[in-house]
Amino acid sequence: MIYKICSTYCPDNEDRKDLQQEILLQLWNSFDKFDGRVKMSTWIYRIALNTAISFYRSEKKHSHNKVAIEESLFSLPDPGEVDSQTDENIQKLYQIISKLNELEKALILLYLDNLRYNEIANIMGITETNVATKLNRIKQKIKKQFE
């Protein structure tokens, strides 16, 4: 779960490692505040997404000072595990997702993890209706870019 969030918000491997550490630190520091009113996975998602969004905003402000050494978008499945067309589609999907805004990335990530709308609403702090509407728009945007 944490790896997926980090991969979505940080295409750079070193930034992804930094974000993973920051998320784990935030989880550790917040653990005594976990009261069990929501599922542990919901609580972890919420902290991880909030940390990722904050990290993304911070990195975006400082990104003009960085020079990309290696362009590796995301860790994709081993090419031997999937056919080339599937691999291309996965790569294209990740590229499209990487261009979404922060809220859209979070929503589609949760959706792709097969969470129910009420769980996504809980994690994101929005209504189920809002989740459904936003996800429908995101899916249409992705579909349009695939065409």
Image (cartoon, helix red, strand yellow):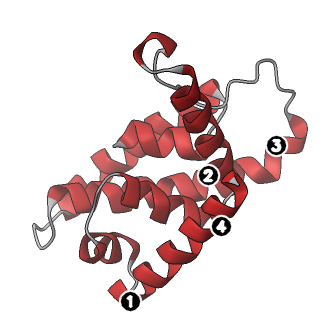
Give the x, y percent position of residue 32: 18, 57
Tag 2's secondary structure?
helix
- Quarter containing the C terminus: bottom right
Of badges 2 and 4, the one in the foreground is 4
**Residue type at numbered disc 2:** Ile
Q: Give me the residue at 40% from left, 73% from top.
A: 124
Please name the residue that numbered disc 2 is placed on: 97
Please name the residue that numbered disc 4 is placed on: 141
20 is higher (above) or lower (below) than 83: below
Disc 4 from disc 3: Cα separation: 26 Å
Q: Give me the residue at 46% from left, 22% from top.
A: 77
Q: Nearer the viewer, residue 145 or 2?
A: 145
Tag 1's secondary structure?
helix
Q: Earlier in the sequence, mark 3 or mark 2?
A: 3
Q: Earlier in the sequence, mark 1 or mark 3?
A: 3
* Label 2 with label 4: CB-CB less than 8 Å: no
Q: Earlier in the sequence, mark 2 or mark 4?
A: 2
Give the x, y percent position of residue 100: 66, 60
Quadrant of the rendered image containing residue 64: top right
Please name the residue that numbered disc 1 is placed on: 129
Give the x, y percent position of residue 134: 52, 78
**Residue type at numbered disc 1:** Thr
Decide if residue 103 is in sight here: no
90 is higher (above) or lower (below) than 14: below
- Spot the residue most to the top: 80
Disc 2 from disc 4: Cα separation: 10 Å
